[in-house]
């Protein structure tokens, strides 16, 4: 039976001090012994092909199950190298495609894709360095820092105009502009429009608690000011035991959602 796993090692050092007190002829002496224990812990975190379960057993004391996995280094290493070669080939294609793009949204999507491909490759390289007898693996052709900077430049090349269509709680434009800046885009008075709407429902009350529901919507509008290139909506709900706190809590919920999700939404629009 074929299994798949990866191990990551972590060194753990513990210093243990033993103190013994002795008293002889009315004189007390203290003796300390210092011991340092060193442990390497292995954590299964990622999948590696071609691991064979050679044995398995149960510890009858704590009822835990254990398995002994045997890995063919050569076979597993070749599989990983092949996958890394595929990722590199796809990265070459994506970067060449990006260089010939005229659509800035597609250029952003390509830059993000190339970055993601090489992040996946880095994980494989870390695994290969464990399996490879030389401990070297196959060094990458691209530095992740360079690919990330290329992605950031692509983001900055897209001017975004923050537009508010509906704001039932107040402060939505400032929150949207802050989220745009955090995501890495350039704010501007022209270019693509990022339109936001926040519509609330009537507050509900039950006993001592109050609830407020709202729908937050983002739309990316093309340079013509009319064509919607993509949109995303989120239902939001906040509660409080004081009705006067509902609007403030809703603003906090909206700000958090924009900070967390604006970039991923824009990448989805660009794909």
Image (cartoon, rainbow, N blue to C red):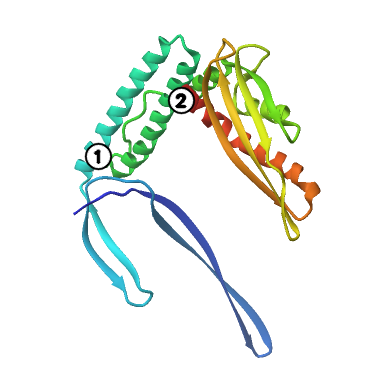
Residue appearing at x 67%, y 24% in the figure: 165
Residue appearing at x 22%, y 37% in the figure: 78
Residue furthest to the bottom: 25
Q: Is residue 230 left or right of residue 242?
A: left
Determine the CA span between mark 2 and mark 1.
Answer: 28 Å
List the residue tagged with mark 2: 112
Indicate the secondary structure of the residue bearing disc 2.
helix
Indicate the secondary structure of the residue bearing disc 1.
helix
Q: Position of residue 22 (x, y in %)?
A: 61, 84
Which of the two discs, 2 and 1, labels the residue nearer the N terminus? 1
**Residue 145 seen in the figure:** no
List the residue tagged with mark 1: 77
Discs 2, 1 touching: Cβ within 8 Å: no
Task: Answer above or below: position of 163 versus 132.
Answer: above
Residue appearing at x 62%, y 35% in the figure: 216
Q: Is residue 71 left or right of residue 145?
A: left
């Amino acid at each position: 039976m074929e299994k798949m796993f990866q191990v990551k090692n972590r060194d753990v050092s513990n210093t243990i001090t033993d103190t013994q007190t002795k008293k002889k002829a009315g004189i007390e002496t203290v003796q300390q012994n210092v011991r340092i224990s060193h442990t390497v812990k292995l954590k299964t975190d990622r999948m590696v092909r071609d691991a064979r379960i050679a044995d398995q057993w149960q510890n009858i004391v704590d009822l835990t199950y254990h398995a002994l996995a045997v890995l063919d280094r050569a076979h597993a290493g070749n599989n990983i190298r092949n996958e890394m070669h595929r990722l590199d080939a796809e990265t070459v294609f994506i970067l060449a495609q990006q260089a010939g793009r005229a659509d800035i949204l597609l250029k952003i999507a390509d830059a993000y894709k190339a970055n993601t491909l090489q992040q996946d490759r880095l994980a494989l390289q870390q695994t290969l360095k464990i399996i490879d007898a030389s401990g070297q693996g196959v060094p990458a052709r691209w530095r992740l820092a360079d690919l990330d900077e290329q992605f950031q430049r692509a983001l900055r090349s897209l001017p975004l105009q923050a537009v508010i269509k509906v704001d039932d709680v107040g402060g939505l434009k400032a929150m949207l502009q802050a989220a745009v800046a955090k995501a890495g885009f350039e704010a501007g008075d022209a270019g693509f429009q990022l339109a936001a709407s926040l519509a609330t429902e009537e507050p509900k009350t039950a006993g001592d608690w109050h609830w407020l529901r709202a729908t937050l919507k983002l739309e990316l509008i093309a340079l013509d000011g009319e064509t919607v290139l993509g949109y995303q909506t989120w239902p939001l709900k906040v509660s409080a035991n004081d009705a006067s706190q509902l609007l403030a809590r809703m603003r906090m919920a909206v700000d958090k959602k924009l900070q967390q999700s604006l970039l991923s939404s824009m990448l989805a629009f660009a794909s």
